[in-house]
């Protein structure tokens, strides 16, 4: 799939997945897309734990009421340092690095015919990120920033409506 088609097709998917597995070769391609994302000072701060063990997927998935979590065929966990190192003039960019990687990953997931949803807000409540960290033996210095369930979507949905170009973008001077 061409990149603009993937951008147009990507949408958050929270519904059921089919029973088909996510092929290992596809998981590798998907995470490779994340590794190739830009990062501040090329520090490449985001790490990934790919969960394809059914028992672990179950343990994580049953914490959520969302169908996509309950019957995910794989889950990608994006990991950042709790106390990220400054890489440029006292600034660290680990949150931005992670977001760039997540978008690349989402586009790769879409391009390969799977669907996902960017889960971050949910992780922050009720110590969910910490609970999942225990399941994957995450060291105390790291935290799970983003979680992405993956599978082949049962429902064929479209991208949600986005505001018009002219409502959010302009040329040369701010005129919105
Ligand atoms: C930083 C960030 C955090 C998000 N956290 C969650 C979340 O915890 N749970 C969830 O269901 N969706 C989450 N989303 C998905 C957004 O709700 C979704 O992208 C938005 O509603 C637009 O829909 P679309 O992705 O279909 O275009 C998150 C998205 C971003 C970018």
Image (tube, rainbow, N blue to C red):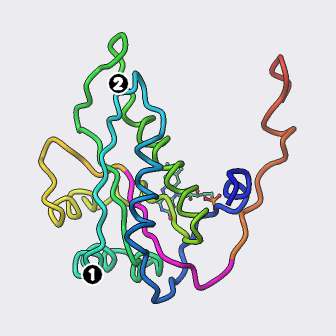
Residue 83, quarter of the rendered image? top left
Say which residue appears at 24% left-offset and 77% top-offset.
59
**Residue lying at the far top of the rendered structure:** 89
Residue 44, percent from left and from top: 35, 34
Disc 2 designates what residue?
A: 92
Q: Are marks 1 and 2 in contact (CB under 8 Å)?
A: no
Disc 1 designates what residue?
A: 54
- Is residue 36 covered in magenta? no
Q: Quadrant of the N terminus?
A: bottom right
Q: Quadrant of the C terminus?
A: top right
Gap in Å between the C-alphas at discs 1 and 2?
Answer: 35 Å
Residue 138, percent from left and from top: 16, 54
Say which residue appears at 25% left-offset and 47% top-offset.
143
The residue nearer to you, when weighing 6 against 71, is 6
Q: Is residue 158 left or right of residue 97?
A: right
In magenta, the rendered stretch is: 146-156
Among numbered discs 1 and 2, the one appearing first in the sequence: 1
The residue nearer to you, when weighing 36 against 157, is 36
């Amino acid at each position: 799939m061409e990149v603009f088609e993937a951008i147009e097709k990507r949408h958050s998917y929270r519904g059921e997945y089919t029973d088909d597995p996510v092929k290992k070769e596809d998981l590798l391609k998907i995470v490779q897309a994340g590794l190739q994302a830009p990062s501040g000072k090329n520090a490449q701060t985001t790490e990934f734990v790919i969960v394809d063990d059914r028992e672990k997927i179950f343990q994580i998935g049953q914490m959520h009421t969302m169908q996509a979590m309950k019957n995910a065929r794989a889950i990608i966990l994006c990991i950042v340092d709790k106390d990220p190192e400054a890489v440029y003039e006292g600034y660290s960019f680990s949150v931005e690095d992670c977001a760039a990687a997540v978008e690349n990953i989402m586009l790769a997931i879409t391009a390969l015919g799977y669907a996902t949803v960017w889960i971050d807000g949910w992780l922050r409540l009720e110590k969910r990120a910490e609970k999942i960290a225990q399941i994957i033996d995450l060291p105390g210095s790291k935290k799970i920033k983003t979680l992405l369930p993956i599978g082949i979507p049962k429902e064929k949905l479209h991208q949600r409506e986005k505001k018009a170009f002219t409502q959010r973008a302009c040329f040369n001077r701010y005129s919105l």
